[in-house]
Image (spheres, rainbow, N blue to C red):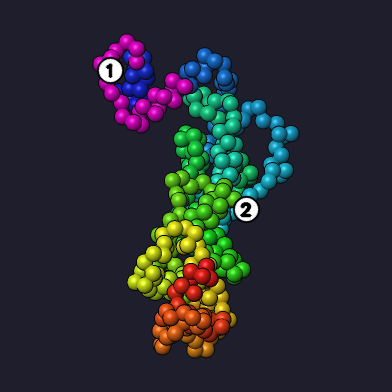
Amino acid sequence: MSKFRRVFTYILDLEVNPKRQPLNEEDLKLGAYLIDFGESIDKGDFDIEAEQHLLDFEDDLQDLSWSPEDDEFHKIQMYPDVVHLPGKPNMIQFGHGEFVELDKVQETVAYYGSRTVFNNNGSKLRPSLSQVQHKFGFIRNRNHLDKLWEYESLGFTKANRKNNLEFISMELEKEVRMHIENGKILHHSVLRFLIAGIIKEYKIDIKNFIGTESWLNAGCTGRIQPCDVGIFGSFKKVVKTLTNYAQLTNSNYKFQTSDETLKLISLLWRQLCSPKLEKWARYAWVAAGYDVPRPASFETPAQLLFPRGVAGDCTMNGCSSTSFVKCLYCDELFCFEHFVIDIC
């Protein structure tokens, strides 16, 4: 039995023979098409017209309703050849290394299936290869027409994911570089928001993708976080030294309360803003790998705040406590009470 008769018999038995012979996936698609075709006839959605084949020009099916006045292809926009990877986002691959914009493909699919007349054999009358080529220059052969038919049958077109990812990567690099050159500090956790902005701005068709920290190669984090590399590490060391000392000598001081914590951080940050630490701060960008002048030798905050010999007499009159820190502004030695508690 021929394929058509097998599928047609299956359709006739749909409601009368529950034990009918099952069909494969390809035959089921043909059956669904025939059912839609029959229902369209009942609804009067199309007209059936005769078809004339020109044997010497198999690509051209003569449209009997055509007249010379209809031939206005010279007024139709001519699209250039395909844009190659990675030119733009939302590209459809139409050949090896050839990509076309998604919106152009969607427009071409709509044009290829726009006619409402059918051939004698029941197939839809479609524009010929040459007619499609006149309007859409990236269509070059029958394989491309088959791809249009496939997109029409599926009901959607899907952009090339690899091309979209490469485009997002390139745009992300531009944006990160711009922010860094403008003096902004980026943390790797905010990259996903930049990526989301790129996807939204260019209306990129990419499903189930969220930029993560894994987009940064090993060793790249420091390049976009110079303060994390050269500033905060030293800041944390000073905080640890101070809090450890306080636990030993001033156990009643409540570091865990928010007010005292904020006061302490404010005090230490004021010390780190001293002009004596300018070279140390500039070195953070050198340590992160930036091409900037390397500062001359310098001392770190811990070395300046807690130098050798810092354990002496507190500079405050009448204070018998041992000093533990040296103020970077007045160069005087202070105990914990007069440096932290009284000042804060």
Magenta span contains residue 102: no
Residue picked out by circle 1: 20
Q: Is residue 6 visible?
A: yes
Image location of residue 170, percent across then percent down: 53, 61
Image quadrant occupied by the N terminus: top left
Mark 2 or mark 1: name the one nearer the start of the chain: 1
Relative to 77, is 42 on the left or the right? left
Which residue matches tag 2?
80
Q: Residue at x 56, y 75 (%)?
A: 273
Q: Circle 1 — which element?
A: loop
Query: Residue 35 colored magenta?
Result: yes
CA gap, disc 2 and disc 1: 52 Å
Outermost residue to the top: 16
**At 59% across and 69% down in the image, what residue appears?**
183
Magenta-tinted stretch: 14-36
- Under mark 1, the amino acid is Arg
Name the residue located 50 percent from the left edge and 62 percent from the top edge: 262
* Mark 2 nearby-residue class (10 Å; few <14, some 14–19, many ≥20): few
Task: List the single residue furthest toward the left.
Answer: 19
As drawn, 320 above or below 5: below
217 relative to 339, above or below: above
Closest to the observer, 243 or 15: 243
285 vs 220, nearest the viewer: 285
Helix, strand or loop for disc 2? loop
Res 265 label: none
Q: Is residue 280 above or below residue 252?
A: below
